[in-house]
Amino acid sequence: MSSKFKLITSNSVERFEERMADFLALLEPDDIIADIEFSTVALPNSVEYSALIHYTRTEKWA
């Protein structure tokens, strides 16, 4: 098994959701999401949305 991380950010909530959905759709059925940390930051004219996804890529049994 190999532990991996993916950082997704956007200052548009719609684009953030789209990027999250795209990434999750690419995961293999046997991959395990260990944790998702969310964060928001208020900027002068917008909000930045971030997610750090910790996942484990498992190896298939023969």
Image (cartoon, rainbow, N blue to C red):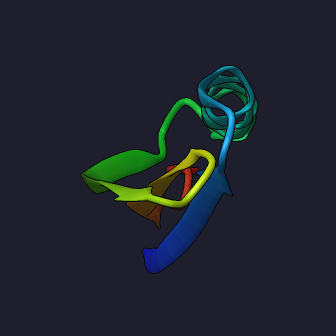
In the image: residue 43, left or right of residue 54 = right
Q: Quadrant of residue 24?
A: top right
Question: Looking at the image, which is closer to me, 46 or 19?
Answer: 46
Q: Image check: 12 left or right of 13?
A: right
The answer to which of 20 and 49 lies nearer the viewer is 49
Q: Quadrant of the N terminus?
A: bottom left
Give residue 44's position: percent from left, percent from top.
55, 59
User: Residue 4 placed where, x, y %?
Assistant: 50, 75
Q: Residue furthest front?
A: 44
In percent of the image, x 44 and y 54: which residue is there? 51
- Camera-side residue of 56 and 9: 9
Horizontal arrangement in the rendering, residue 59 relative to residue 18 (left or right): left
Residue drawn 61% across the image and 56% down it: 8
Query: Percent from the top left, x then y, of residue 38?
Result: 30, 52
| Numbered label tally | 0
Compared to 51, does 17 lie above or below? above
Task: Decide: is 7 above or below 8.
Answer: below
- Where residue 22 sits: x, y (%)? 75, 30
Dividing the picture into quadrants, the one containing residue 55 is: bottom left
Using the image, determine if residue 59 lies above or below residue 15: below
